[in-house]
Image (cartoon, rainbow, N blue to C red):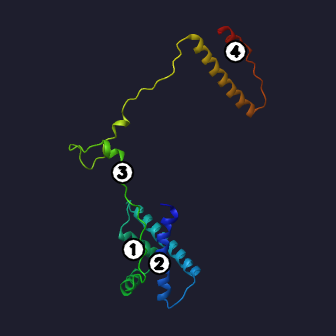
Amino acid sequence: MSQQVEDSFPRKILKIAAAQIAMSAGYTDAKESALETIADVMEMYIQEIGKKTHQISEHNGRTESSFIDLLFAMEQLGIDIFSFGDYVTKEDKLFIDGIPEFPVIKATDEVPIEKQYNEEKPYIPGFLPPLPDARTYKNTPIYQKRHTDGISLRKEELKVRHLNEDALINLKNKINGEMKVNYENGMEEEQQIK
């Protein structure tokens, strides 16, 4: 599901709430831009309440926020909790037009790899994590190309040495300036090997 689809659901809810706030204030008609602005303000306000609630819960040494943290955050932001409670109990209209349906991703029939290969072991307590897959600690051979004769080994060593020298010279040239290379000794050795 794309980010745009995920964002559209909360945005629709905020716009419906903004329209209902405008209706409860006595307006019968509102422009789209006005509702967008009210929805933006509401979104920022809700985010600020969430940030404050999170800060309070972390300050108290918890990773998850509680209702008490929410009350403290609302109090710090200047919200009168008692009048807010009165408003919630007095306001009987929740959503006039109803809430749009939340976009849910359909579940697939695919079984995760871990569940395919790991069967439940009764001797492992449920609170412990499952053992890693057998494929994670299985030894697999790594085959390296071996040189069987000395000539091909020496050629490979010369090739690697030239590549290293070229890399160092390129690095030095980038730092200081030009430098010429003479591979005559290496070429003579290579000719002797052939």
* Residue matched to label 3: 110
Q: Nearer the viewer, mark 1 or mark 3?
A: 3
Q: Quadrant of the C terminus?
A: top right
Residue 103 locus on image (x, y percent): 43, 67
Q: Nearer the viewer, residue 89 or 97?
A: 97
Q: Amino acid at mark 4?
A: Gly
Which badge, 1 or 4, comes first in the chain's sequence? 1
Q: Work out how far the residue at label 1 is from the one at label 2, CA to CA, in angstroms.
A: 11 Å
Q: Residue at x 35, y 85 (%)?
A: 89
- Return the residue at label 4: 186
**Type of amino acid at the residue the image marks with label 1:** Leu
Q: Which residue is mark 1?
A: 71
Few, some or many C-alpha atoms within 10 Å of disc 1 (few <14, some 14-19, many ≥20)?
A: some
**Helix, strand or loop for disc 3:** loop
- Cα distance in 3D space between marks 4 and 3: 59 Å
- Distance from disc 2 to disc 3, alpha carbons, whole Å, reads 50 Å
Residue underneath mark 2 = 78
**Which comes before the other along the chain, label 1 or label 2?**
1
Given this view, does label 4 or label 3 mark the residue nearer the observer? Answer: 3
- What kind of residue is marked 2? Gly
Question: What is the CA distance from the residue labelled 2 to the residue labelled 4?
Answer: 81 Å
* Circles 2 and 4: CB atoms closer than 8 Å: no
Q: Are marks 1 and 2 in contact (CB under 8 Å)?
A: no
Within the image, what quadrant is residue 152 found in? top right
Name which quarter of the figure residue 98 lies in. bottom left
